[in-house]
């Protein structure tokens, strides 16, 4: 039974309850009136049981409720009501079906969104990989270009370092006049092992004899050459010779210090160094520079190169040399 069928029953039950209450009240009033009359007249009441009666208003309410219930039942059994109920039930089924469809649509949208996010992630990963590969390719292309450029640019080196006359301990036995004619001048060759001529833009260097090598090269102003000098590639083995004078007095005491240092005697630490720095220009205006440091061993009369000495031994090509020159100019300013 549907909920709308309960309403008439509830109304009928309410009407019956009201009628019962009305009958009870009426009977009570009649009993009270009869008792009062018997008491006043002292006449015995007839032995007749009063019949309960329903007030007219209550009867009308009951009839109205019964008619309403009958009308509701008639309407519930009508074809229109059946049609309405069927349509209502069908609409509820359609809503449930649509809700199910919306659920699956939401699931499909979620899967599509997840697939899109995954696709974006894969795309970003592929982009990063491509960028990394492009960076590697660019570096490799630059390296190949540098190799090709290096194969065409000039490459200067210092070689064949030598003294005008070999210094040895026998000079200590010379007289002062004979020793005065001895010098510690250094000669060397600049060779071009590249494939194009080089133009030397600046050449500076000198000789240092002492116990501790200065932190920075300190050439004599007279040993800084700025005249342009072309070093060709015609004769790579011979090169072009240069020299530096020893600008201080070379005495017997200084020679004795050098000899004693090489012999390991205590208290002697003097050493004989030669250094040179060269800036040169290649094709296209590229500016390269390098520096070298050599030490002379008086006990064996030979020169040895000193690699990896800060500020003395280096080689800078192209832009690196230009940056270094710019930094030096800023420090000078």
Image: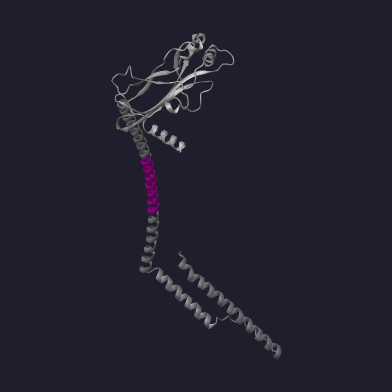
Out of 207 and 180, give the one closest to the viewer: 180
Number of numbered discs overlaid on the protein picture = 0
The magenta span reads 100-124
**Colour mapping used in the image:** one colour
Q: Is residue 261 above or below residue 1?
A: above
Residue found at the very far front of the displayed protein: 177
Q: Is 76 situated left or right of 28 in this image? A: left
- Where does the image place residue 285, in percent across and percent down from the top left? 32, 33
Q: Nearer the viewer, residue 22 or 124?
A: 124
171 or 120: nearer the viewer: 171
In-front residue for pair 58/273? 273
Magenta stretch: residue 107 in it?
yes
Above or below 328: residue 213: above
Identify the residue at horizontal 53%, vertical 72% (top origin): 13
- Give the overall secondary structure of the magenta segment: helix
User: In the rendering, at what x and y percent does residue 25 appear?
Assistant: 61, 80
Q: Is residue 210 left or right of residue 102?
A: right
Q: Is residue 39 magenta?
A: no
Q: Position of residue 240 (x, y in %)?
A: 34, 20
The quarter holding residue 302 reads top left
Q: Residue furthest bottom?
A: 41
Q: Position of residue 175 (x, y in %)?
A: 51, 10
């Amino acid at each position: 039974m549907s909920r709308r069928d309960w309403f008439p029953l509830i109304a009928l039950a309410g009407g019956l309850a009201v009628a019962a209450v009305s009958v009870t009240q009426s009977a009570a009033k009649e009993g009270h009136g009869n008792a009062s009359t018997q008491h006043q007249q002292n006449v015995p009441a007839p032995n007749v049981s009063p019949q309960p009666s329903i007030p007219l208003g209550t009867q009308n309410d009951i009839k109205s409720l019964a008619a309403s219930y009958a009308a509701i039942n008639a309407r519930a059994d009508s074809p229109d009501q059946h049609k309405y109920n069927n349509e209502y039930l069908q609409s509820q089924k359609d809503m449930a079906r649509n809700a199910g469809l919306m659920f699956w649509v939401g699931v499909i949208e979620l899967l599509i969104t997840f697939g899109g996010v995954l696709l974006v992630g894969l795309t970003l990963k592929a982009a990063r990989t491509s960028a990394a590969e492009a960076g590697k390719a660019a570096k490799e292309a630059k390296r190949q270009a540098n190799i090709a450029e290096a194969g065409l640019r000039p490459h200067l080196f210092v070689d064949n370092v030598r003294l005008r006359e070999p210094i040895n301990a026998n000079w200590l036995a010379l007289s002062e006049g004979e020793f005065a004619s001895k010098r510690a001048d250094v000669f060397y060759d600049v060779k071009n092992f590249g494939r194009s001529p080089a133009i030397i833009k600046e050449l500076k260097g000198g000789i240092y004899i002492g116990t501790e090598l200065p932190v920075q090269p300190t050439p004599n102003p007279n040993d800084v050459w700025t005249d342009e000098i072309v070093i060709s590639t015609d004769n790579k083995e011979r090169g072009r010779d240069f020299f530096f004078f020893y600008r201080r007095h070379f005495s017997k005491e200084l020679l004795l210090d050098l000899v004693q240092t090489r012999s390991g005697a205590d208290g002697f630490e003097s050493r004989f160094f030669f250094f040179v720095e060269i800036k040169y220009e290649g094709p296209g205006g590229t500016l390269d520079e390098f520096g070298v440091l050599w030490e002379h061993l008086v006990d064996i009369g030979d020169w040895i190169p000193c690699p990896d000495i800060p500020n003395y031994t280096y080689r800078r090509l192209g832009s690196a040399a230009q940056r270094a020159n710019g930094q030096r100019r800023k420090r000078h300013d």
